[in-house]
Image (spheres, rainbow, N blue to C red):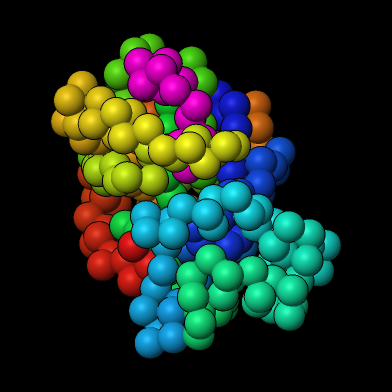
Amino acid sequence: MKITEIWRYPVKTMAGEKLQRVRIGPLGIEGDRVVHVEDALGQVITSRTHPRFLGHKGTLGSDGEPLVDNRPWDSPAVAVEVVNIAGPGAKLVRYDGVERFDVLPLLVATDGAIAAFGHDHRRLRPNIVIGGVEGLAEREWPGGCLRIGEVLIGVQDLRLRCIMTAYDPDTLVQDKEITRSIYRRFDGKLALNCFVIEGGEITVGDEVQLVRGRACAESVAAPTNSGILG
């Protein structure tokens, strides 16, 4: 098994950037989901209710600062577009705490499950895609660990999917049948909620090993976060 894709989403709920190499720290891929959208009352807004955000792309600039469509995330032009989508008082907010994640800091998908899904895998918004996995083998991985060079990732459980999977990542056209099919065919769950045990750098093409048994079992008791960003 090998890493075939790496994705980072510097601005929560917007499209992300495909990368060749990243550094993984205690809270997952460095720079991931460090900016999110809030309404006038300070409530977090996502593409579940405002899918037009998926039409904008978050990246990190050379200085490590988030960009929206190649513009500084805190620029006046971006602020106007956020209000246009989410209404008066909506704004982008930077927050680096652990609560910024839906569940856990990393979402790992496999090529076998993606093939079974049968649609654009960007709908699943993975951080890491692993190739060379047969069929739905990922469903047997919870409780194990993934060794990628010096990096060790704990696999907690399968990710329960939401309505965001219904939106085409390019056209933003909604097809609710795609989300329904995930519930009908996969019990609502695809890809894996994961957490970092040992950090380091990973690169597309790196070998991935599934680790089971006592060596991994002592490291997989990581708590699930409540996820303020939904």
Q: Position of residue 221 (x, y in %)?
A: 22, 55
Front residue of 36 and 135: 36
Q: Is residue 181 magenta?
A: no
Write the residue at 51% across / 82% down: 88
Q: Position of residue 197 (x, y in %)?
A: 41, 53
Write the residue at 35% across / 16% down: 116
Q: Position of residue 151 (x, y in %)?
A: 52, 45
In the image, residue 86 sits, relative to residue 215, either above or below, namely below
Q: Position of residue 212 (x, y in %)?
A: 28, 32
Furthest toward the right, the residue is 62
Write the residue at 83% across / 62% down: 62
Q: Is residue 123 magenta?
A: yes
Tell me the quarter of the picture where residue 4 sits.
top right
In the image, residue 213 sits, relative to residue 185, either above or below, namely below
Q: Is residue 88 visible?
A: yes
Write the residue at 38% across / 45% down: 164
In the image, residue 169 sits, relative to residue 32, either above or below, namely above
Q: Is residue 211 visible?
A: no
Front residue of 37 and 222: 37
Q: Is residue 141 left or right of residue 194?
A: left
- Magenta residues, start to end: 111-125
Dominant secondary structure of the residues highlighted in magenta in the image: helix
